[in-house]
Image (cartoon, rainbow, N blue to C red):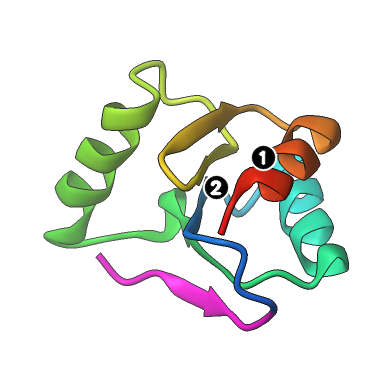
Amino acid sequence: MKATNVNGKRKGSIMLYALSTCGWCKKAKDLLDQLGVEYSYVDVDLVDGPDVDEVLREVDRWNPRRTFPTIVIDGKCIIGFSGEQIKESLKDAG
């Protein structure tokens, strides 16, 4: 599975599973960009070929309901967009 990496300040391991058409996913990316943190993301709906099964297994591991955004910060999962929860998790990360 190929994730896109966004450079920034290292605040632990941050992985965002998103949909390219999801407004809440865009808000999550925008917030992480504004905070200037390093993170990786996968737009799940744009994955194809053999990577589809891999990315869906990874999403299922954190969020079996497959709702988006699904954000994993240092092993803690945030489902949906919650700016405050993301900021709070980043305080504890890294």
Q: Secondary structure at mark 2?
A: strand
Quadrant containing the N terminus in the rendered view: bottom left
Direction from residue 53 to residue 2 in the image, left or right: right
Label 2 and label 1: CA atoms lie apart by 18 Å
Farthest residue to the top: give it. 65
The image shows residue 70, relative to residue 50, as above or below, that is: above
Dominant SS in magenta: loop
Magenta stretch: give its range. 1-8
> Foreground: 35 or 6?
35
The residue under the point 62% across, 64% down is 11
Picture coordinates of residue 25, whole percent (x, y): 68, 45
What residue is at 17 percent from the left and 50 percent from the top?
54
10 Å neighbourhood of mark 2: few (<14), some, or many (≥20)? many
Q: Nearer the viewer, residue 46 or 1?
A: 1
Residue type at the position of mark 2: Ala
The quadrant of the picture occupied by the C terminus is bottom right
Label 1 crowding class (10 Å Cα cut-off): few <14, some 14-19, many 20+? some
- Give the percent coordinates (x, y) of residue 77: 49, 31
Query: Which residue is at the far bottom?
Result: 7
Of callouts 2 and 1, which one flags the residue occurring earlier in the amino acid sequence?
Answer: 2
Which label was assigned to residue 89?
A: 1
From the viewer's perspective, is residue 10 above or below residue 41? below
Three-letter code, disc 1: Ser
Q: Which residue is mark 2?
A: 18
Using residue 71 as the reference point, say whether residue 34 is left or right of it: right
Residue 21 located left or right of residue 46: right
Among the 4 quarters of the image, the one containing residue 59: top left
